[in-house]
Image: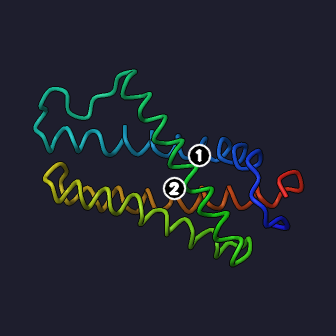
Amino acid sequence: MKNTSFHWKPFIIITLFTSIWINISEVFRYFLLVMPRTKAFFQGRAGVAEMDWGIFAIWAFWDTLLTAVLVLGFWLFAQVFGNTLKTATVSGTFIWASVFVIFWVATANMGLADWKILWITLPLSWLEMVVGAFIASKLYDQPRFA
């Protein structure tokens, strides 16, 4: 990362490219692992863990916001520590702890999820964030984004 000034255009482009991975990861984790366990936890109660177009739109907004926070977090870490694999890992882990750990612990603590689901969601969401930060790292390394 040669440029220490923040530029919106590369940030938006990198966010959009990185969001492809984030969306794929979120959809995989939710439909294959989280949704069935959430429905079982609530014993098949109607309307729990359902997906329709309105919820899908909110989810798309969530994923885009999550990706923007991840890319910005990586950029900030890279300004101080350089664009390295360690920086991608640390920034991805920081964003993961700030978003996913707080969300899932709070959800389970309020009785809205089984504590056992954290053994699935937390490691996979950590991998999602670290890979996303790595993608942002590689894209920021490109001369057109410098």
Residue 72 picture quarter: bottom right
Q: Which residue is mark 2?
A: 128
Determine whether 6 is above or below 77 in the image: above
Residue 109: percent from the left, percent from the top?
17, 60
> Relative to 108, does residue 64 appear above or below in the rendering?
above
Between residue 4 and residue 47, name the one nearer to us.
4
Q: Secondary structure at mark 1?
A: helix
Q: Is residue 92 above or below residue 34?
A: below
- From the viewer's side, name the closer residue of 81 and 42: 81
Q: x, y (%) of residue 35?
A: 29, 39
Q: Amino acid at mark 2?
A: Glu
Q: Tell me the residue at 74%/75% (across/down).
A: 82
What mark, if any, has residue 21 been given in the picture? 1
Measuring 19% from the left and 60% from the top, which residue is drawn there?
115
Q: Quadrant of the N terminus?
A: bottom right
| Residue kind at label 1, given as amino acid type | Trp
Residue 131 on image: x %, y %: 59, 59
Asked if the residue under mark 2 is in contact with the one under mark 1, i.e. CB atoms within 8 Å, the reply is yes
**Label of residue 52 in the image:** none
Element type at marker 2?
A: helix
Quadrant of the image containing the C terminus: bottom right
Query: Quarter-wise, where is residue 3 in the image?
Result: bottom right
Quadrant in the picture for residue 133: bottom right
